[in-house]
Image (tube, rainbow, N blue to C red):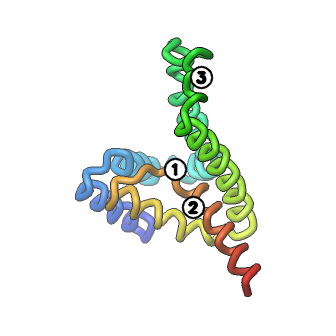
Amino acid sequence: MLNQASLFLLVLLAIALWAKNKSLLFAVIFLLVLKWTGLGDKVFPYIQKKGINWGVTIITIAVLVPIATGDIGFKQLGEAMKSSYAWVALGSGIAVALIAASGIDLLKEDPHITTALVFGTILAVSLFNGIAVGPLIGAGIAYMVMKVVHFIT
């Protein structure tokens, strides 16, 4: 029961407790329960394959709630577009989506890079109160930096 994977998860559990990071704490406990009950062998491949899509969908739902409640409508959109900050936000949203798309390509081409990206995300979440949306964007940034380095050398 206490193999390398469980030990690693327990270390992450300790980090989550120390950092008081509820998201990481919940995720690690969830994975440990699946692993220790024997459900992990059946569920982990499915979560690994579909989990990012679920997460993106949940985040998208949360972002769209103000539209569904009527707090944000066409009037607010029109007013926002008069602001230079709104244009910066629009450009940032486009850039992040494009960078994340490059990240998916990198993860498909170099799956071993996932280890470093996941570890970087864990560090950011646990030590710096980051949010765990980093792997795709991190992979996209890594992809872009790798392309620049390849172009320069």
Residue 90's place in the image compared with 106, above or below, is above
Cα distance between the residues tagged 1 and 2: 9 Å
Residue at the disc numbered 3:
77
Q: Nearer the viewer, mark 2 or mark 3?
A: 3
Asked where in the image residue 89 lies, by quadrant, the reply is: top right
Quarter of the picture holding the C terminus: bottom right
Q: Which mark, by number, is residue 133?
A: 1
Q: Mark 3 packing: few (<14 Cα in 10 Å), some, or many (20+)?
A: few
Residue in the image at 30% along x and 55% along y: 16
Q: What residue is at 70 percent from the left and 70 percent from the top?
A: 110
- Which residue is nearer to you in this view: 148 or 46? 148
For the question of whether residue 114 can be seen, the reply is: yes
**In what element is the residue under mark 2?**
helix
Q: Nearer the viewer, residue 116 or 2?
A: 116
Residue ID at (53%, 30%): 63
- Which of the two labelled residues, at mark 1 and mark 2, occupies the earlier sequence position? 1
The residues tagged by marks 2 and 3 sit, at their Cα atoms, a distance apart of 30 Å
